[in-house]
Image (spheres, rainbow, N blue to C red):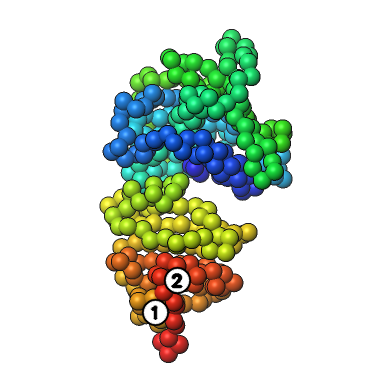
Amino acid sequence: MPSIYRRNINNLLFIIIIGLLSGIYWYKKSIDISRSAACTNTVTLENESIKSIKYIEKKEVLGVKSGINKTVSEISYVYPDKLRIESLDNIKNIEIYNGNKYIHYDGKIKIKECFPIDKPNILEIEKNINDSINNKNYEFLGYEIKDNKRLKVISIKWKLNDHNYMQKFKLQEIKGITLPYMEEYFVDNVVISKTTYDYLKVNETLKEDIFKIESLPSSDIINDGVLSKTVESYEEAQKYLNFRIIVPDKIIDGFIPWEIGIIPPAKYPSFYCIYFDSGNRIYLNESEGSLDLPPNGIIGEYPCRIDIENETVILKWKQENILIALSGDTKNMIQIVKIAQSMAKGTLIKNEQK
């Protein structure tokens, strides 16, 4: 998610939790529906009902400690890989995705190399709504009149961990496309977020200049490295990589894949996964390369390097021509070793003389 939505850490964590819960629901409901991979050559224009869109998004999120957090953004998108998100709040903040270039303005202009964007959120919402309606996985709640618009009201409900969740939509038709006028999330019948959408243009020509650096206020320009891309699964990550990723055979001691992603450059991308359990994190990185220090141990049949510094353990080895690195706090040493042994299919033996 673009950084414009990361202003308050408590609200961010809350949004992530709700997003994961919602994602679990949508995944279960659409598991039998084939989905094209965004931003790859497998996506065709004919499969997209929205080729360009410009709208105002007003979001209210009930924060954990700081009350209601409100954001207002103007979002412009042109298929397949141009996106501009401009904050309309007091703080000027603009993000532009244009092919393999990410540009961020917050008083200064920072440029990163990135992967082409996925669809903006509104296209994913539109697809999920249509999938749910087509598969009758919703409850019809009636109609409402708002701003001279006749809105169809539906809800999606599910249970998880003894809590009741509901996603409620007020829908409108624009040029034959079903789009949300309002989206609300409820947990145990309490609303925890509300988003309204005001559509300025749908499938109309947008000026390409707004996706260029020249559209931003004059400022210093900083080349700021690369921007990683999060994906939903190992399988999705594999589509971007030039090598076959290696992952643990099973979940280790309660750790789950919390974040999966890929890192540019697009010609030589690398893979990462963050495993999470009750505040503990273990980081897995894979890339094409070799050990940068002499090995001081062996894991299975592979020479490895294990180092401990500043309460951090790093374990590296090369397997199937892939450089693998696992790292985390020393308190998670046992779990790190178990994950490594699962991947290498052998025992870790450290040579204390090296």
Q: Is residue 75 visible to us here?
A: no
Relative side of 98 to 249, left or right: left
Comes first in the chain, label 2 or label 1: 1
Work out whether residue 155 or residue 231 is closer to the camera in this orientation and state it: 155
Residue ID for mark 1: 298
Q: Residue at x 40, y 38 (%)?
A: 118
Residue 338 place in picture, x, y as percent: 50, 70
Q: Residue at x 42, y 24 (%)?
A: 53
Decide: few, some or many residues near mark 2? Use Cα within 10 Å; few <14, some 14-19, many ≥20. some
Q: Quadrant of the C terminus?
A: bottom left
Amino acid under disc 2 = Gln
Quarter where residue 119 is shown: top left
Residue 52 vertical placement versus 289 (above, below): above
Work out whether residue 275 or residue 224 is closer to the camera in this orientation and state it: 275
Relative side of 134 to 195, left or right: left
Residue 200 place in picture, x, y as percent: 47, 20
